[in-house]
Image (cartoon, helix red, strand yellow):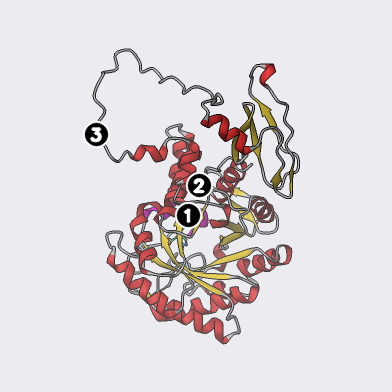
Amino acid sequence: MASTLFNASCSFPSIKVIDCKSYVGLRSNVSQVRVASLPVATSQRCSLVVRASNGHAKKLGRSDAECEAAVAAGDVPEAPPVPPKPAAPAGTPVIQPLNLNRRPRRNRASPTVRAAFQETDISPANFVYPLFIHEGEEDTPIGAMPGCYRLGWRHGLLQEVAKARAVGVNSIVLFPKVPEALKNPTGDEAYNDNGLVPRTIRLLKDKYPDLIIYTDVALDPYSSDGHDGIVREDGVIMNDETVHQLCKQAVSQARAGADVVSPSDMMDGRVGAIRAALDAEGFQNVSIMSYTAKYASSFYGPFREALDSNPRFGDKKTYQMNPANYREALIEAREDEAEGADILLVKPGLPYLDIIRLLRDKSPLPIAAYQVSGEYSMIKAGGVLKMIDEEKVMMESLMCLRRAGADIILTYFALQAATYLCNQKR
Ligand code: PBG
């Protein structure tokens, strides 16, 4: 499914002038070779059939030596003339060319040249598709995220996954909308083996065994307080007690068949604790994608509407990172690496390209970028209002996340962008 944004054309590799002013395109491993004659005087034309057998072209007509001798004797075959210089518009100043020994535009002069020197590629294999699920049977549109729905876990979800797989997106991450009645201050529904997420994983794995399922590990969809951790009376988010719950949540997801558990809660020490809990239950092969540098960002607004998971009070600034901080991402990355994370994630994406680049340069681990709900909705809104070209801005923003160093991208555009990439392919 690999595909580049600009595919090189697949024409015949070489054109050789053989004889009698005929241009013959030769292609190895093809027995019948195309012969194209240039319009020349009929008397001069030799009809030429070239057959390539075992890769060797048998030639007819004059020998190489005869051709060379003819040229040496001044009998030079004709070739098309050099085209005239294209005219500049009237009024163009006549100037001395600048004396430049480097003109970078030479390497951008044509689609072929640009494709040859393109440094970054993007393919549907790089995408992870975040999907919202609920207990309902209908798909409910999410107002703040045009094109996104809370999908019925037994209906709409299966269709959406099938569509994604058809264009090469075989990785998804699940976000549940949990019934209010099941939420409590300690988020215990998070580790219910028969809860919405484990049930959905079992259904998906039954239907698509090779689908890679990422899960979110955090209490917010299950917490009556809307926080990622347990909230103490005085408003403090309790770290170690929350980690205890997260371990149970991760194990429950792994038991259902999750491939990659993804702690997005930003508690200290949760990666190591989850690794130990998974291993103790025999889930050595389940990966951990850590939300290493997750910032306390206003770009998550639409997501919280989607899941109805807004914090009931306060904000998430005691666990999510300060958007003003850069070096702090390194502290988190070192911890996550030491604790055994398999993938490091940066979130949000586009406003945090410097953090993606930082982790890419400082860690050998794969890097994930999350193009979050607010980034998605801004591009959608700009497109709907005809202020920007939605498709082009979508592809450019995804390419920029790759250029900054992201291996994989969690994006609500996964299906749309992969469809675009597949249509680019020939
Ligand atoms: C919560 C979680 C959030 C997102 C992913 N997991 C929201 C939050 O931290 O409040 C946001 C994703 C998005 O905005 O697209 N653990």
| SS at mark 2 in the image | loop
Residue 154 in the image, given as x and y percentages of width and height: 70, 58
Point out the frontmost of discs 3 and 1. Answer: 3
Give the residue number, with chain letter if any, for mark 3: 99
Q: Quadrant of residue 298?
A: bottom left
- Can the viewer see residue 127 in this picture? no
Looking at the image, which residue is at 72% across and 30% down?
A: 48
> Which residue range is magenta in the image?
298-309
The answer to whether residue 157 is left or right of residue 4 is right
Few, some or many residues within 10 Å of mark 2 (<14, 14–19, 20+): many
Q: How many marks?
A: 3
Q: Quadrant of residue 20?
A: top right
Q: Tag 1 or tag 2, which sits nearer the N-term?
A: 2
Q: Nearer the viewer, residue 126 or 295?
A: 126
Give the residue number, with chain letter if any, for mark 1: 303
Looking at the image, which residue is at 44% across and 77% down?
A: 270
**In whole angstroms, how far apart are the C-alphas of marks 2 and 3?**
53 Å
Give the residue number, with chain letter if any, for mark 2: 145
Quadrant position of ligand 1? bottom left
Amino acid at the residue labelled 1: Phe
